[in-house]
Amino acid sequence: MIRKSHLAVLLLAAVAAGLVISAAFNLSPISNALFVGNKDKAPAVAASASGRMLPVDIPALFKEVSPAVVNINTTQVVRLNRPRMRSPFGQQDPFEDFWNNYFGNVPKEQKRKSLGSGFIVSEDGYILTNNHVVEKADEISVTLLDKEEFKAQVVGTDPKTDIALIKIKSGKKLPFVHLGDSEKLEIGEWVAAIGNPFGLGHTVTAGIVSAKGRIIGSGPYDDFIQTDASINPGNSGGPLFNLKGEVVGINTAIIQGGQGIGFATPIHLAKSVLGQLKEKGKVTRGWLGVYIQRLTPEMAESLSVPGRKGAVVADVTKEGPAEKAGLRSGDVIVAFNGKSVADEHELPQMVAGTRPGTKVDIKVIRDGKELAIPVTIAEMEGEHVRRAGGADLTKGLGLTVQDITPDVARHMEIENRKGVLVSSVEPGSPADDAGFQEGDIVRQVNRQPVANAAEFRKMLTKQKGVKTVLFLVERGDARIFLAVKNK
């Protein structure tokens, strides 16, 4: 039997050990962090002496914002072609009745269902989600937290940023969430994701911002927030919240087979197009008319560019705004409209967000000297994206490509960086008809190897008189040839 004196000594030792452990790891209960930032309600231990913040009370956050998060179910009617059987007997086929009877019950249409998430941004029922969640949907159904269901209509879509605005009519004021400032997010900051993974209904997960500005090759304006908050199929279009309960991202993509790696579209991209989607149903973007590429350290030294920041002009579009203003191949753009340009990924978003007709000053380094060149931004024709490191086929092929940057190569596990990555395929275009898919890697054009996007564009320019262009495409572990008719 343990004596009382021994028991007391053990209890004191346990308490002392607990205090040492807590002090060493700077721990405090999550409940103490419920009111982080509110001095009237938050306990003194909500933040450490160095100002580090602890996780927010997830149950309280969920109760506050989840009524504005919705589950989205879509239905698409797909028409099926009846099998065609070739008879060895020619037109006089004795088995014709058999085939007709056997295949006569094959359905001509089939309904395909998919699911996703979204969030209400106004009390009158406007909802933000991903474009790929509602794209090509014939019916859209929205389910609220209280299981109430509504039919939704698409108000506007922007495939380039994978953002869509839909609307429901409820006849009452709806709960909505506030949009935060994703540009102020810091790596390591706590975030929470709410959505409809695998159709299970409202689900919350939490984690931190693992990285910012990720380029994953999904589109022309890649600028993703990487988070380790668990995201799965069905979370697409759902909100990513900061500790204040503000939406800072739209959960968009995952890496197949990856764990703890999810990507969200920064909410500042959605805010920049939200007004146009609501008013016009589409997005009009600015166009500069340049093809640019990464400024490598070697190029920066050769071109006498201080700081190694900027985007190299590989070429200019004939009679485009840049050419008319006097920009040349070899210029290094270091500032656009008063804002510094860090690399080739920043410039397309700056240009695209500029209203057509606006006159801006572009600062370039040319032959080691800094020049300020005024340019009047034009409207991007037909939503063809002339993006950094990319080539846009304006002659009807309907294919947009980009350089295989180190980030893209790492995330997509591409060993050979020579070639170009297909970032978008225009539906119904010759490239689409030929079988191109997003994520394909083009290694050759008409049996000639291609190194990067700038070279790819120049090679295609030489194919103007060729009726058919042959591409060697790498898709997964396989290589295939795709032939595209050149219009």
Image: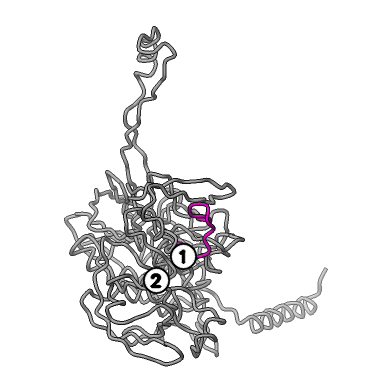
Residue name at image x 50 percent, y 62 percent: 262
Residue name at image x 35 percent, y 58 percent: 130
**In the rendered structure, are the residues bearing label 1 and label 2 in contact, judged by CB atoms less than 8 Å apart?**
yes
The boundaries of the magenta stretch are 441-456
Residue name at image x 56 percent, y 69 percent: 406
Task: Give the crowd class for mark 1: few <14, some 14-19, many >=20 residues within 10 Å.
Answer: many
Judge whether 14 appears above or below 421 on screen: below
User: What amino acid type is highlighted by mark number 2?
Assistant: Tyr
Q: Is residue 66 left or right of residue 166?
A: right
The residue at which mark 1 appears reads as 453
Name the outermost residue toward the right.
Answer: 1
Asked if residue 53 is among those painted magenta in the image, a careful observer would answer no
Regarding mark 1 in the picture, which secondary structure is present there? helix
The residue at which mark 2 appears reads as 291
Question: Residue 142 or 355: which is nearer the viewer?
Answer: 355
Judge whether 409 appears above or below 374 on screen: above
> Where's residue 469, x and y in %?
43, 50
